[in-house]
Image (tube, rainbow, N blue to C red):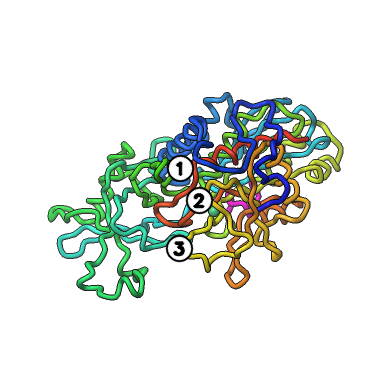
Amino acid sequence: MTAGYLQPDCHPAPIRYHALFIHSRYSLTLMHITPEHRRHAQDLLNFIDASPSPWHAVDTLAERLRASGYTRLDEREPWSLEAGGRHYVVRGGSSLIAFRLGEARPAESGYRIIGAHTDSPGLRLKPKAAHGTDSLLRLGVEIYGGPILATFTDRDLSLAGRVSLRTAEGIDTRLIRFETAMARLPNLAIHMNRKVNDDGLKLNKQTELPLILGTLENALPPAEQFLSLLAERALCPLSDLLSFELNVHDIQPGAFWGAAGEFIADGQIDNLSSCHAGLTALLQAPPAVPTAVCAFFDHEEIGSASHKGADGSFLEDLLERLTLSRPMDATAHKRALARSLMLSADAAHAYHPNFPGAYEPLHAIQVNGGPAVKINVNQRYATDGPAAAHFMELCRRTGVPGQTYVHRTDLGCGSTIGPMTAARLGIPTLDCGTPMWAMHSARESAGVLDQLWFSAVLILFLVDA
Ligand code: CO
């Protein structure tokens, strides 16, 4: 935890210029949960439930941006941009960058960039997914990233993603989702798996992960039985369906839990909670001198090396276009980058009292204890000393408690998009996020207070010149 402003009698000044109610004390009690905290947490759950795949997450982001007056730009076209202009760009259907141009030129004031990721670990359908075994129709899956596989058993699963099809105008790609619990990965009964509670649930990734989709219809080959469902959902003839990318998601909506409803549970809290906080900050931040940018990337969970990932050219390409949208000299873009700051927002590991040995004792962070800055000397997180100080000052000035996370020295540390965007762009970067339990489970948990607090800190980050 950060020092200095955690004493119960410390009353930092709240943000003057936005509507969020921010608490001025760290001495947390459940009384601190205001209707505003609850509304904000409910809005996060709605955002997640509307986004069962990274393609849907981008669609949800775009819809909210349009509702707030942002317009979409096409990377293939020239852009005419003006101070204060609010726009967004989509690349590859599942990465999106939104920005609001500042009052000053980027070369004079730089960029304030929030980065987060739209993807979550889980199961994805193989291209030839459908097959029949005995009387059952099954779906073969690949593992995307590093999910806790056992958590996908016995859940109400469904499919969401996109399909590409042939039309008179060429290939068209459409989002589809199924709302019903159409697929399932039933556990093996304990009577055939007697040691499951001693050894944990182990699943063979090739043979024991296929989902049960239904009962085979004798008249139809399995592929046709399955693809007809997709074609019907995409409103196209089966013969026009060319390819699909489908994510397996849990249809159970997000929920509040805990004796006082002080926690939330949902899928994909890592990292749609950070996308939601970044979007909230961008939409609520008052006009400012620097240019505000929110970059939401797909493919973080699998290393980010793709044409739309954080280790690709998307953010660089966009920033260069923004700088050069006004007539400037040859050094303008380098000067803009040199004046910029990035905040890499990604969920953090909260202390779990059943497993005290999993945490670094002096750097354990608490759910509902405030957002955490993440530090790793080997640059698995990009934060350096000045960036950590910046985070602590953002927290103090918004009246939000801040925490400091360091992974145990004897455990391998995860990473974020922070180090790679810092390396590509040469921009100092702050890695931080809200504390959560059960990261990469099909059903993750977090705190009602932290989400609003994090949004408040991000608002100040964007507008601070
Ligand atoms: Co993450």
Q: On the rendered structure, is 312 left or right of 3? A: left
* Span colored in magenta: 306-314
The residue located at (45%, 63%) in the rendering is: 354
Name which residue type carries label 2: Asp
Name which residue type carries label 1: Glu
| Above or below: residue 318 compared with residue 444 | above
For the residue labelled by badge 2, is the local secondary structure a helix, a strand or a loop?
helix
Task: Indicate which label's residue lies in the foreground, 2 or 1.
Answer: 1
> Mark 2 packing: few (<14 Cα in 10 Å), some, or many (20+)?
many
- Do the CB atoms of the residues marked 3 and 1 lie less than 8 Å apart? no
Task: Indicate which label's residue lies in the foreground, 2 or 3.
Answer: 3
Some atom of ligand 1 lies within 8 Å of the CB belonging to the residue at label 2: yes
- Residue tagged 3: 354
- Residue tagged 1: 262
Q: Which mark is residue 374?
A: none
Sequence-first tag of 3 and 1: 1
| Above or below: residue 206 compared with residue 93 | below
Some atom of ligand 1 lies within 8 Å of the CB belonging to the residue at label 1: no
| Mark 2 to mark 3 CA distance (whole Å) | 21 Å
Q: On the rendered structure, is 245 left or right of 458? A: left
Q: Which mark is residue 270?
A: 2
> Mark 3 packing: few (<14 Cα in 10 Å), some, or many (20+)?
few
Residue 224 placed where, x, y %?
A: 24, 51
For the residue labelled by badge 3, is the local secondary structure a helix, a strand or a loop?
loop
* Closer to us: 243 or 347: 347
